[in-house]
Image (cartoon, helix red, strand yellow):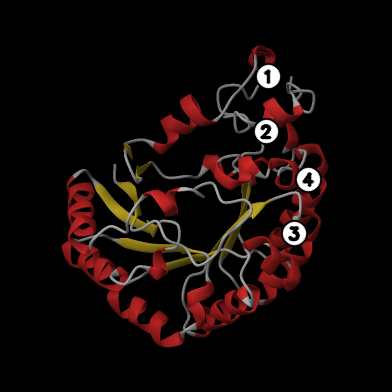
Amino acid sequence: MYKRADIKVGFACNNHCTFCVQWDKRYKYKPRTIEEIKWIIKREYDNWCKYAVFTGWEPTVHPDLVEAVAYAKDIGYKQIQIQSNGTNFDKIDYVLKLIKAWVTEFSPSIHWFYKETHDNQVHQKWAWDRVVKGLINLRKLNQIVVINSVITKANYKEIPQLAELLVKLWVNQFQFAFVHILGSADKNKDIVVPKKSDVIHYVHKWLDIAKKAWIPAFTEAIPYCLMQGYEWAIAENIMPETTVVDAEWTIDSYADYRWNEWKAKREECKKCSKYKVCEGPWKEYPEIYGWNEFKPIY
């Protein structure tokens, strides 16, 4: 069974998001050299990874990303995705270089419907305009666009409007993941982390918008008990087995790591009919809001 390799090519970023899970690593680690990146690409290919995701804190600021993509294609990777904050996709010449190198899927993120709130939260002027321009570029070039964005206290009420915008932009798929409470998201948790019971109405609403438009849509880190009737949109159900090559370590199985390290369930969850398939919330979440929102499904 083939796996996916999630490869962090570098640790710099042109944004400074209030909800970034990797915040301090930009100060601790140098960008990987192209020789290091190629070595990782080949190692993971030999370990049965035939799908690659180039990510990091912002992969498009790495000067050798195009070369890394071309190398992955040359040794046999079947699909190559760029997971990005999306701002550099506004440069159509750069996008064309990535396509020529054989990127098969683009995964930019846009977090707010209103440009002012987006720019304020990523701490970068004109970021929203650049992401939208990049989305238009990608669709004009007939590229596969998979949106991967974050649900926060500041944006959850805007998500249905954002979903309508993404439908108009003809993206191929979108996902809104509940914020992972690490890095700057942990430091700013009072203003970043919403209650899931407050969020869920808006989640269901944007999923309805996507379903009506026949666009696949998913959400991550929201347990089954809050997703009744929308179980089809639980992203954990469709995530491929992935190896994550991070700054200091490699996670051989992202699924195992989520189940055993990053997510949590309580004793009462054992009564739930979905216990064996539900991963639970991020383990930091109940430390903030407790467990009262989560009720077993009988």
Q: Nearer the viewer, residue 74 or 281?
A: 281
Mark 1 and mark 3: Cα distance apart in space: 29 Å
Residue 199 badge = 4
Mark 3 and mark 2: Cα distance apart in space: 20 Å
> Is 272 positioned to the left or the right of 147 in the image?
right
Kind of residue at disc 2: Tyr
Q: Which badge, 3 or 2, comes first in the chain's sequence?
A: 3
Q: Is disc 3 surrounded by few (<14), some (14 to 19) or many (20+) residues within 10 Å? A: many
Q: Nearer the viewer, mark 2 or mark 4?
A: 4
Counting the numbered discs, the total is 4
Mark 4 and mark 1: Cα distance apart in space: 22 Å
Q: Which of the 4 image quadrants contains residue 26?
A: bottom left
Query: Which residue bears the numbered disc 2?
Result: 224
Q: Which badge, 2 or 1, comes first in the chain's sequence?
A: 2
Q: Is disc 2 surrounded by few (<14), some (14 to 19) or many (20+) residues within 10 Å? A: many
Vertical arrangement, residue 294 with respect to residue 116, above or below: above
Kind of residue at disc 4: Val
Q: Which of the 4 image quadrants contains residue 257?
A: top left
Q: Secondary structure at mark 4?
A: helix
Q: Is residue 157 visible?
A: yes
Q: Residues at badges 3 and 2 in contact (C-beta under 8 Å)?
A: no
Mark 2 and mark 1: Cα distance apart in space: 10 Å
Q: Which badge, 4 or 3, comes first in the chain's sequence?
A: 3
Q: Secondary structure at mark 1?
A: loop
Question: What residue is rendered at 20% in x and 66% in y?
Answer: 71
**x, y percent for residue 187:** 63, 42
Location of the C terminus (image quadrant): top right
Q: Residues at badges 2 and 1 in contact (C-beta under 8 Å)?
A: yes
